[in-house]
Every structure is written in C-alpha cells, then in structure tokens.
Image (tube, helix red, strand yellow):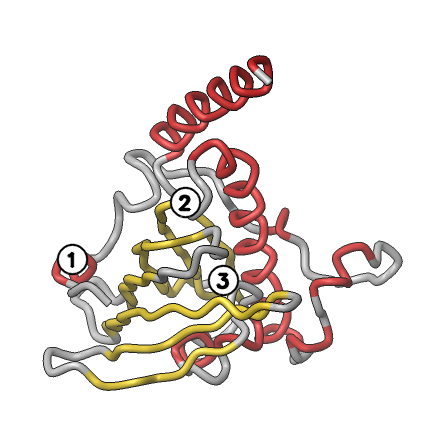
Amino acid sequence: MATIVGILTIVSAVGGCSMASAQGLYVEVLIRADIEAVWQATQDTEQHPRWDARFSRITRIADLVGGGYRFRYERRLPGHVIVGTGISLGEKLRADGTRTSALRFDTDDRLSPLRSGRGYWRYVSTPEGVRFITGYDYTPGFGRGVDVILRPIVLWLTAWSFDRLRIWLEEGVPPESWPPVTVIAFWKRGRPKASRCVTRLPVGGALANAPRTLTDLEAP
C-alpha cells in the first residue's frame, strides 16, 4: 500500500509540473473552405456537436446584454450524461480581419474529467483557406495525477474533431459518417486523423493569443 501511495504521489507531482509547463491545449487545422462556412459550422449550436466529439448536445439558453449567449452542454457516456453550462461571445468584424470566439464553461458533475475552463477559437483567412485555431485550458475533474493520462486524450479528441470538421467542409462528407469507432478502421481511406492538425504550443502557451473578449467574459 505504501508503494502505491508513493507512486501516486510522484505521478501527482509530475502531473502538476506537466500541466504548469504545458500551459493549456492548442490545436490548429487548415480548412480549404470559405470563412463564413467555417463560422456557421462552428457557431451554430445545432451543427457544432455534429463534428465535435467533445459534445453530444449544445442548447442555447439566453442571449447576454453585452453580446454573446449562455448555453447548456451535454456529453453522453454509457449510463450517464455529463451536463454543464457555458458562455460564448463571438467577434465577426475585427480590425485585423480575423474572427474570434471566446468561451468559458463549468460543471459540477463529479464524473466529468473537465470542470471549469476557458478558451477561444480564431478564424484566420489565408490564400490557402481558413486557419481554424483553438487554445484552451481547464481544471481537471479527477486531480492532476489522473490528468497526466487524460489530458493527452482530450488533446487528441480535439484534434480528431477538427479534422472531421475539415473533411466535412472540404469534401462534403457528413461528420456522422465518421463516428469515433472509425478511428480503428485503418482500411478506410480519408478517415479523420488528429495527426493532420498542429498541436504544438505557441510561445507563451495556448492562451497567449486569446482575444481580449476572453478576459472580460463573465462566469457561466
């Protein structure tokens, strides 16, 4: 028992260092599509869960006076549904020509690996297409020791979802054609792959280039 406790203590300590140095999660993918198409597929609360495997359902609850809206999200698991709330605020017209969306979320569900968190999306038009970027971080639901294992999975799931979005907008293949189980379908060409996305953190961490709206966003 003492040995197990010692190992868990070491893992927890390493997890704390890892999280401090990781500075959040970052994913970027180039989508060869019109920026308005990317915006609609990601901002529409009915379309978003179709491609983003992190969510099963997103329901818009109320508009906010200063812009943006409050929402309820769900993630269905075998025998349980994780439920949380969030705040989202988008910017379509910015001086630099990009679009952004700031987000804060929270849940008190004890079975959720992600509790409170915040992040952003950035849409950058280029001659090749739209660079769709996210940077976010969260409080681990099961402690930092367990998060050492879970955090890379969350990063992978985000990147895999981004590539599923890319395939949908570039090739017209509905996201439902690629359920998570197709990850192991190695014989299927063109299936979503997390490896097609950039996941290396920028200088300063995942939130270094977050829009100013994220700082002012109220708690969900």
Of residues 57 and 209, the one nearer the viewer is: 57
What's the distance in space between the residues labelled 3 and 1, CA to CA? 27 Å
Residue occupying the far right of the picture: 187
Looking at the image, is 201 positioned above or below residue 96?
above
Q: Residue furthest front?
A: 1
Q: Secondary structure at mark 2?
A: strand
Which residue is label 1 attached to? 212
The total number of labels drawn is 3
Q: Secondary structure at mark 3?
A: loop
3 or 1: mark nearer the eye = 1
The amino acid type, in three-letter code, at marker 1 is Arg
The residue tagged 3 is: 128
**Structural distance between the alpha carbons of marks 3 and 2:** 37 Å
Residue at horizontal 33%, vertical 70%?
Answer: 85
Residue 59 spot, x, y in % from top left: 40, 83
| Circle 1 residues within 10 Å: few <14, some 14–19, many ≥20 | few
Left or right: 8 in relation to 89: right
Amino acid of disc 2: Pro
| Residue at x-position 32% and y-position 59% | 120
Circle 3 packing at 10 Å, graded few (<14), some (14-19), many (20+), is: few
Q: Nearer the viewer, residue 140 or 93?
A: 140
Marking on residue 140: 2
Q: Is residue 13 above or below residue 97?
A: above
Q: x and y percent of residue 101 in the render?
A: 29, 67
Give the mark toward the camera: 1 or 2: 2
Q: Is 109 or 68 nearer to us in this picture?
A: 109
- Amino acid type, residue under disc 3 in the picture: Glu
Asked if 143 appears above or below 134 in the picture, the reply is above
